[in-house]
Amino acid sequence: MKVAGYEIPPVFSLLIWIGLWEVAGRMDLAFILPPFSSVLGELTTLIVRHDFLAAAWQTFQAFAIGMFFAITGGIALGFIMGTNKTANSILGMWVNIFASAPLSSVVPVLMLLFGLGQLTVVVIVVLFSIWIIALDTYAGVHHTSNSLKEMGRSFGANKTQLLFKILFWAALPEILAGVRLGLIRAVKGIVIGQLLLSVVALGRMFRTFSDNFQFEEFWALTLILFVFALLFSTLIGRLESKVEYYAGTRD
Amino acid sequence: MNKAIHMSLPDATTPTDPSANIVSVRGITKFYGSDVHALEDVNLDFPTGQMTTLLGPSGCGKTTLLKIIAGLLETTSGEVMVKGKAVTSPGPERAFVFQDFALLPWATVTRNVAFGLELTGVPLKEREAKAKSYIDKVGLSGFEDKYPHELSGGVRQRVGLARALAVDADVLLMDEPFSAVDEQNRRKFQEDLLHLLSVENKTVIFVTHSIEEAVYVSDQIVLLSPRPGRIHSIIRPELDRSSSPDDIRRDKVYLDTVEEIWGNIREYLD
């Protein structure tokens, strides 16, 4: 955006919203919306609190473990679907359904199945992110140019070489896009999961803060999650731009 | 007067002499599914050390035939003999040059040229040294660390050619290699290819739809008729290869052969 010939950085629009938030907060328009500055103040005290750090660590563990299974499982599923027509006709429909289904509604069932603890949160992370990773991987593998595959075969590639020296790299841009979308969905899933469970980690803190009308703390926690999600998706975005140079040149 | 020599068609019973013909196909018929009839009973010999062009209008099955010889497509019936042995899959004695180059977009020129060697497990140092020597031979010195998207079509195809030469196959299979290369670069590339092949002593099977290109580069031209593809005729242009490229293109034999082939192809286009 340009104003009066000056390039305005994209961050600026964020600053405007923060300014509005601050003003609205100070005007005491709604009790759930304290001024941004006091939220920030609360944030600095919150991030050093022991119960927060423990909760954040627990959440991060569930996130990391869940993402590990979602990424390995999703990529494997995508490759199976992309290289085997029978597998694709059996699995494809289900993967599509799960990728678009409102999975929050099955969280209560998962609670019954896996209990009210960390395991359920991990399962939620996997369920929220694995399908989009599988779908994107499938798209990448499926659209690998036929002549690249023929090239591999004509120069004597065996199945393993075809997979790891050609198909994987050809599909990598789509795989990374899938992982980025999967990460964002996983953050969503973890928040929804912990909120519904409300006895685990950050979910419990969220619940406590909102039950006790501690809105500075509530918003501070929300901000932290936002930043966390943004950070991860930016990191993956960086990786994506590294492989973009060849994604754009394929047919 | 036309000095091009016409040959009789080899029939299915002709015994193959592996020393004279490095590749032979016998009775090749190809259906795609049940209704597309691509090739019908094709019998052909490809003399060792010569350049044979498969020429014909689109839909005559020339690329299909080339990919069958490469072992990339299965035949419906018939067999491909390479050095006297029947083959049904790709092998180290054949190397393919692709119409759309088929370069790895994530790999440098060096790695692309060395890719065939990488697949067969040649150690890194050795294959890079070999790649380097072929990069020089196809005129790409200085491009070693470039990526395919940084190169023009002509340069990309030189990489594809270097990759095929690097595996040291006896037979080069080229599928319309110059069709995605612009006209000026194509002529230069054709000349370079002829020069390179005279040094490297390869047998080349070359698919093209350009009559001029076929007559300019070939020892033997196989004219195919469309749907289903059959051999229409085999022509051996008797050009004096020792004269300069420009003289060859002005040569009466060259021009007459182009005209004659055009006359044959024209009947399929109406």
Image (spheres, rainbow, N blue to C red):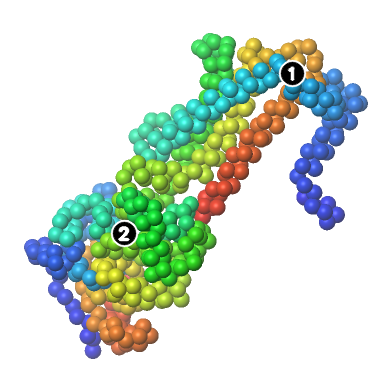
| Pick the front one: A3 or B162 | B162
Residue designated by label 2: B167
**Mark number, residue A49:** 1
Q: Secondary structure at mark 2?
A: loop
Which quadrant of the structure image shows residue B225?
A: bottom left
Residue sitting at x 29%, y 85%: B242
Looking at the image, which residue sits at the far right? A27
Q: Secondary structure at mark 1?
A: loop
Residue sitting at x 33%, y 49%: B121
Residue A128: x, y in percent?
55, 26
How many marks on residues?
2
| Pick the front one: B54 or B130 | B130
Q: On screen, B201 above or below A120?
A: below
Q: Are marks 1 and 2 on the same chain?
A: no
Which quadrant of the structure image shows residue A229?
A: top right
Residue A13 seen in the figure:
yes
Residue sitting at x 85%, y 54%: A4
Residue B156: x, y in percent?
45, 63
Q: On screen, B232 above or below A95?
A: below
Hey, what amino acid is under mark 2?
A: Val
Hey, what amino acid is under mark 1?
A: Arg
The subunit carrying tag 2 is B
Residue A206 seen in the figure:
no
